[in-house]
Image (cartoon, grey):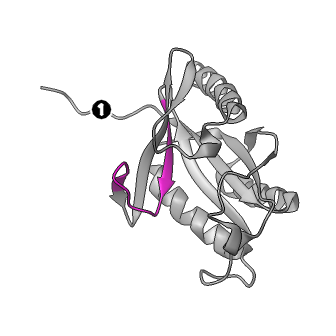
Amino acid sequence: MGTPSLPQPVKLLMGLLAADTALFVQAAMRLEAAYGRIDLESAVFPWETTDYYRAEMGDHLLRRFVTFEQLITPEDLIRLKLEANKLEYNFAAPPGPASPRRVNLDPGYLDTTKLVLASTKAQAHRLYLSQGIYAEVTLLYHHAAYHPFVYTYADYRWPETHDFLKQARTKYLKQLRER
């Protein structure tokens, strides 16, 4: 019989999507105020993977990833997704849930073996957590590399994303050793 145990802390990751890099700066300031110092930022990548957000957010979207120095617990993912949604509403024009988003915030976490993302959308590969929030294992870390699943979003398959996540994982492992 197994004995329940608490998981190790995990590294908070936030994916940002916007048409204007100034929104990345503004969002980063708000995120740092809420979650502490950002310790890694990816380069900014053109996001041309799908037309899904075009009607709401426009053309020429850009992608950036950030991670935070402060580690979290996996169950924080529910609160983080709800807070990210509120922050998106604050950046909308005019502010509110019925207005078009100007920035998309996707919270998740990485641990030693995987990257997990939060979602408000139910799908066969997502597990319901609570309060309308689902979680999916988006990438598996195995044999020194990240591996996607059939449902993994295109931008999480990019070599540039994997390079950034490997940097974040290295930093995370160092943080665990120092605890």
Quick one: 82 or 164, which is closer to the camera? 164
- Say whether residue 101 is visible: no
Dot 1: element: loop
Quick one: 3 or 62, which is closer to the camera? 62
In the picture provided, is 91 more to the left or to the right than 174?
right
Q: Residue at x 49, y 53 (%)?
A: 118
- Amino acid under disc 1: Ser
Please, is residue 24 above or below residue 37 in the view? below
State the image coordinates of residue 169 (x, y, percent, origin top left): 61, 27
Where does the magenta region start and end? Answer: 114-128
State the image coordinates of residue 11 (x, y, percent, origin top left): 57, 37
Question: Seen from this angle, which residue lies furthest top?
Answer: 143
Magenta span contains residue 26: no
Quick one: 20 or 113, which is closer to the camera? 20
- Say whether residue 94 is visible: yes
Q: Residue at x 74, y 61 (%)?
A: 30
Q: What residue does disc 1 label?
A: 5
Please, is residue 77 above or below residue 171 in the view? below
Picture quadrant of residue 94: bottom right
Q: Residue at x 36, y 48 (%)?
A: 125
Picture quadrant of residue 174: top right
